[in-house]
Image (spheres, coloured by chain):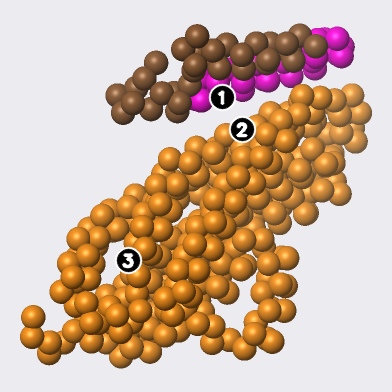
């Protein structure tokens, strides 16, 4: 969405960063608790999905 | 006097407090690790979280200093542009005498625009990517953060080169320091503090031509205060950046590469902010010196 100043990219960037931090924090907690490296693939997948969805949102696709 | 002294001592006190706090945390973590070996898996993660909570305020402070500086500089240039352009028309002979080019104003405006729209968001993103990289080392964003920092550094260097080129071209800047002495000094400073070091040497050599005239007009005390005020934010940012670098150097042997790497990355980002603050300081001083010279040369003219 475009904000009041028309800063579309800034808002998109903020959303992406917040999502990224959230997934990294949750991922780290899971990694520490489960003590398994297999979860890493799912974290990477989630991060990539976040990137793609935000990019699509940014490009209005 | 005490208050003025505090302005300069406060950043150093904050730096000292941060260093002592991190040292205490390091000792505590080492003690806990010694008694509970299983704690080691959680130690790095917890240490990073504590670092963010402890030093986050310093980083936020650095960004707010930069934000304030950019806003002040933006207002200053917005206010001074009509005056300078009017003077440019009225005192054409004076401007041709001091060989000043209006392109400089354009470069300063671009610099402010870059700071507002690119620099602060880009460095914030780089910092967050660094944090993510260090938090889960298997998912690395280091290339992205380095790319962002490198791009910002390129933009800053380009602005500096443009400024120095225009000034040299019009004959305003000439290097009073002997090249034989200046080059090795510059190299040493550049190697120690990239970008900032060369900015200091280049920037200060620009002002020599106007310095004596301006000091005659404004007086030594006023000029010193003026210089101090212009470069105070940059100095404060430099102290913040060097604090992070210093803590990274102290902590490295005791905590491992993750934590010291994160601190070093934050230091690098703050050093970039400092470089831009120095550039803005140079721009600020330069415009004032130009105005002072015009004032002196324009006195008594019938226009």
Residue at 45% from the left image edge and 48% from the top image edge: B115
Distance between mark 1 and mark 2 Cα atoms: 8 Å
- Residue B78 image point, x, y percent: 26, 55
Q: Does residue B251 appear in the picture of this structure?
A: yes
Q: Secondary structure at mark 2?
A: helix
Decide: marks 1, 2 in contact (CB < 8 A)? yes
Predominant SS along the magenta part: helix
Residue at 50% from the left image edge and 13% from the top image edge: A57
What's the colour of chain B in the image?
orange
Q: Which residues are magenta?
A: A13-40
Q: Quadrant of residue A46?
A: top right
Residue at 73% from the left image edge and 65% from the top image edge: B191
Q: Chain of mark 1?
A: A
Instruction: State the residue in front, A55 or B231.
Output: A55
Farthest residue toward the left? Answer: B302
Q: Which mark is on residue B128?
A: 2
Query: Are there few (<14), some (14-19), or many (20+) residues within 10 Å of tag 2?
Result: some
Same chain for the residues under marks 1 and 2 in the image: no
Residue at 69% from the left image edge and 45% from the top image edge: B265
Chain identifier matching the brown colour in the rendered picture: A
Q: Secondary structure at mark 1?
A: helix
Q: What residue does disc 3 label?
A: B102
Quadrant assignment for the N terminus of chain B: bottom left
Q: Name above or below for residue A33 compared with residue B98.
A: above
Q: Chain of mark 3?
A: B
- Residue B263 image point, x, y percent: 70, 45
Same chain for the residues under marks 3 and 2 in the image: yes
Q: What residue does disc 1 label?
A: A17
Instruction: State the residue in front, B234 or A3.
Output: A3
């Amino acid at each position: 969405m475009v904000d009041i100043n028309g800063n579309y990219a800034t808002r998109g960037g903020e959303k992406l960063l917040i999502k990224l931090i959230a997934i990294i924090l949750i991922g780290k907690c899971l990694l520490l608790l489960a003590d398994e490296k297999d979860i890493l693939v799912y974290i990477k997948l989630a991060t990539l999905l976040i990137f793609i969805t935000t990019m699509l949102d940014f490009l209005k696709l | 006097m005490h208050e003025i002294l505090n302005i300069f001592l406060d950043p150093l006190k904050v730096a000292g407090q941060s260093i002592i706090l991190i040292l205490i945390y390091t000792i505590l973590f080492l003690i806990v690790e010694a008694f509970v070996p299983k704690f080691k898996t959680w130690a790095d993660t917890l240490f990073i979280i504590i670092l963010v909570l402890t030093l986050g305020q310093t980083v936020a402070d650095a960004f707010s200093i930069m934000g304030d500086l950019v806003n002040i500089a933006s207002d200053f240039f917005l206010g001074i542009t009509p005056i300078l352009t009017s003077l440019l028309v009225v005192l054409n002979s004076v401007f041709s005498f001091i060989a000043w080019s209006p392109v400089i104003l354009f470069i300063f405006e671009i610099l402010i625009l870059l700071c507002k729209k690119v620099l602060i968001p880009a460095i914030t993103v780089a910092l967050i990517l660094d944090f993510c990289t260090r938090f889960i080392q298997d998912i690395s964003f280091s290339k992205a953060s380095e790319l962002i920092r490198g791009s910002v550094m390129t933009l800053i260097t380009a602005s500096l080169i443009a400024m120095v080129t225009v000034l040299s071209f019009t004959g305003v800047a000439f290097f009073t320091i002997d090249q034989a002495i200046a080059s090795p000094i510059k190299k040493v400073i550049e190697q120690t503090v990239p970008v900032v070091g060369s900015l200091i040497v280049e920037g200060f050599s620009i002002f020599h031509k106007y310095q004596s005239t301006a000091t005659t007009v404004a007086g030594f005390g006023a000029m010193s205060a003026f210089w101090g005020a212009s470069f105070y934010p940059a100095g404060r940012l430099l102290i913040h950046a060097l604090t992070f670098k210093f803590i990274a150097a102290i902590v490295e042997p005791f905590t491992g590469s993750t934590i010291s790497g994160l601190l070093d990355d934050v230091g690098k980002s703050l050093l970039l902010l400092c470089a831009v603050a120095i550039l803005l300081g140079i721009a600020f001083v330069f415009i004032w010196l130009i105005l002072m010279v015009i004032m002196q040369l324009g006195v008594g003219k019938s226009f």
